[in-house]
Image: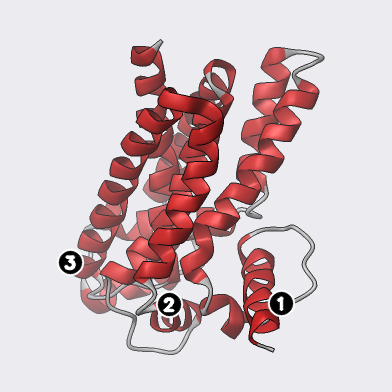
Amino acid sequence: MPGWTWAKRLASLVSFLTILPSPKRDLVLASEALWASPLIGLIVAFISLASLWIVGLVDAWLGAFTFTTLAYMLSGLLHLDGFIDFADVLSTGARGEEAYRILKDPHKGGKGIAYTILLVVSVYLVYMRLAELSPVAAAVAIVATYEALYLAGAMGDPPPYQGLGRLFIVNSRGRLGLNLAAYVIAQLLLIITGGLEALVTALGSTAAVLAASAYAVSRARRSLGWVNGDVLGFSLELARCLAGYTALLLVIVFK
């Protein structure tokens, strides 16, 4: 039945993008549902918000820390691995075959590690403060973050070899309308809850994610000539940071 096929695709996407238990794990089906990545972000945001409200009853700071930790860890750090790999490439300025060799080298460069540490520290500081000031705005930024996966894949050319990156990019093409609908629905649910402040942060976070995705794809074209799974992960993590910063600034100004 068509309805069950859609359900299997979404369940497979949940199993791929998160550590949440799922009744189905099929990478081909997951790749066909990448357009629904903002809905995965919404699931992660709701779980993180629930932890914030529950733990926050004991201590506000601990609640914000739990929110940020869950929002990060629910992905299984899948995208952080892509960030450090592509950051290695960017830190050397290499292009072509040399850039690809660095990308696939299991030994991480010092600059790539330093960039990753800076990213993680920044994300924790920003989202913990954002969760304290406006939990809904923090959730808005998380949903926007997951949109980067589809945007980077839609803007970039797939790699010339078989792999997960190519599978997801090729199989997700031609579904921009579905992706935009999923993104609007996911953000609208939060905007209804958070009102004008959530709307403003949604617009700002969206702009930040567009900028992060465009930057990642632009640098990938110059260094590699194409976009693969590591670039998608880099795009998401960069978007996570920029969306959080933007949302925090807007919340501070709004208040």
Q: Amino acid at mark 1?
A: Arg
Q: Amino acid at mark 3?
A: Arg
Q: Residue furthest left?
A: 222
Picture coordinates of residue 182 (x, y %)? 48, 59
Picture coordinates of residue 112 (x, y %)? 40, 50
Whether label 3 touches label 2, CB < 8 Å: no
Residue that mark 3 sits on? 222
Q: Is residue 84 visible?
A: no
Q: Give the residue displayed 80% in from the left and 25% down from the top.
A: 54
Residue that mark 1 sits on? 25
- Rounded to the nearest angstrom, the CA distance separating label 3 from label 2 is 23 Å
Which is more toward the observer, 66 or 135?
A: 135
For label 3, the crowd category at 10 Å Cα-Cα, with few meaning under 14, some 14 to 19 and many 20 or more, is some
Which is more toward the observer, 2 or 217?
A: 2
- Rounded to the nearest angstrom, the CA distance separating label 3 from label 1 is 34 Å
Query: Considering only order in the chain, which callout, 1 or 3, is on the residue closer to the N terminus?
Result: 1
Q: Quadrant of residue 70?
A: top right
Query: Considering only order in the chain, which callout, 2 or 3, is on the residue closer to the N terminus?
Result: 2
Q: Is residue 99 visible?
A: yes
Whether label 1 touches label 2, CB < 8 Å: no
**Relative to 186, is 59 on the left or the right?**
right
Q: Amino acid at mark 2?
A: Ser
- Rounded to the nearest angstrom, the CA distance separating label 1 from label 2 is 17 Å
Q: Is residue 56 above or below residue 6?
A: above
Picture coordinates of residue 96 (x, y %)? 22, 76
Q: Which mark is residue 49?
A: none
Q: Is residue 182 above or below residue 7?
A: above
Q: Which mark is residue 172?
A: 2
Query: Considering only order in the chain, which callout, 2 or 1, is on the residue closer to the N terminus?
Result: 1
Per the image, label 2 sits on a secondary structure element best described as helix
